[in-house]
């Protein structure tokens, strides 16, 4: 855990959040500023600040985020169309420096995204 990381605090339940899923490797919470009817954050318990900080040993964990997002999309009944977003760095819109995957669904998505 990183002391000043909001996601580490959420994972440790020091800050409240609406959990949709959790296991020994990751958690999924509802985004507090949803951009779609379904907007979940899939977050590894292991603190990795951004994709550039990920190691080869993190490959299974990072792949697990995508797989869990797929299962959550099915659970939320948006499997017919959803978007997965992973921002890397402040120039890409990353505001919390703990790797996390956004699962957005329940509305039409446009391209380009922004």
Image (cartoon, grey):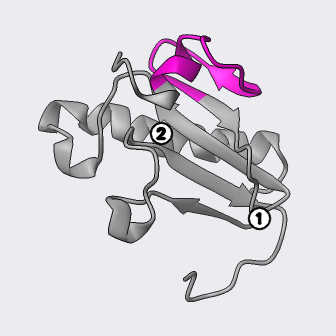
Residue positioned most to the left: 56
| Residue 114 occupies quadrant | bottom right
Vertical placement of residue 58 versus 19, above or below: below
| Residue 57 occupies quadrant | top left
Segment colored magenta: 8-27
Vertical placement of residue 95 versus 59, above or below: below
Indicate left or right for 97 with 9 as reference.
left
Please say whether residue 88 is one of the residues in the magenta stretch.
Answer: no
Tell which of 44 and 3 is nearer to you: 3
Q: What element carries label 2?
A: helix
- Name which residue lies at 52% across and 41% down: 67
Please say whether residue 24 is one of the residues in the magenta stretch.
Answer: yes
Vertical placement of residue 59 versus 106, above or below: above
Q: Residue 65 carries which label?
A: 2
Task: Tell me the quadrant of the picture where the N terminus can be found.
Answer: top left
Q: What element carries label 1?
A: loop
Q: Kindly identify which residue carries mark 1.
A: 80
Q: Rate crowding at label 1 as few (under 14), some (14 to 19) or many (20 or more) other CA atoms within 10 Å.
A: few
- Name which residue lies at 24% across and 33% down: 58
Cα separation between marks 2 and 1: 19 Å
Q: x%, y% of residue 35?
A: 74, 62
Indicate left or right for 71 with 50 as reference.
right
User: Cβ–Cβ below 8 Å for labels 2 and 1?
Assistant: no
Q: x%, y% of residue 38?
A: 79, 52
Q: Rate crowding at label 2 as few (under 14), some (14 to 19) or many (20 or more) other CA atoms within 10 Å.
A: many
Q: Nearer the viewer, mark 2 or mark 1?
A: 2
Residue positioned most to the front: 4
Q: x%, y% of residue 90?
A: 36, 62
How many circles with numbers are drawn on the protein?
A: 2
């Amino acid at each position: 855990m990183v002391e000043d990381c909001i996601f580490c605090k959420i994972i440790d339940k020091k800050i409240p959040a609406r959990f949709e899923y959790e296991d020994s490797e990751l958690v999924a919470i509802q985004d507090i500023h949803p951009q779609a009817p379904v907007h979940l954050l899939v977050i590894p318990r292991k603190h990795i600040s951004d994709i550039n900080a990920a190691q080869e040993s993190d490959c299974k964990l990072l792949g697990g985020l995508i797989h869990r997002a797929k299962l959550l999309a099915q659970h939320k009944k948006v499997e017919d169309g959803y978007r997965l977003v992973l921002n890397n760095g402040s120039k890409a819109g990353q505001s919390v420096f703990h790797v996390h995957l956004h699962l957005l669904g329940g509305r039409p998505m446009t391209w380009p995204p922004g």
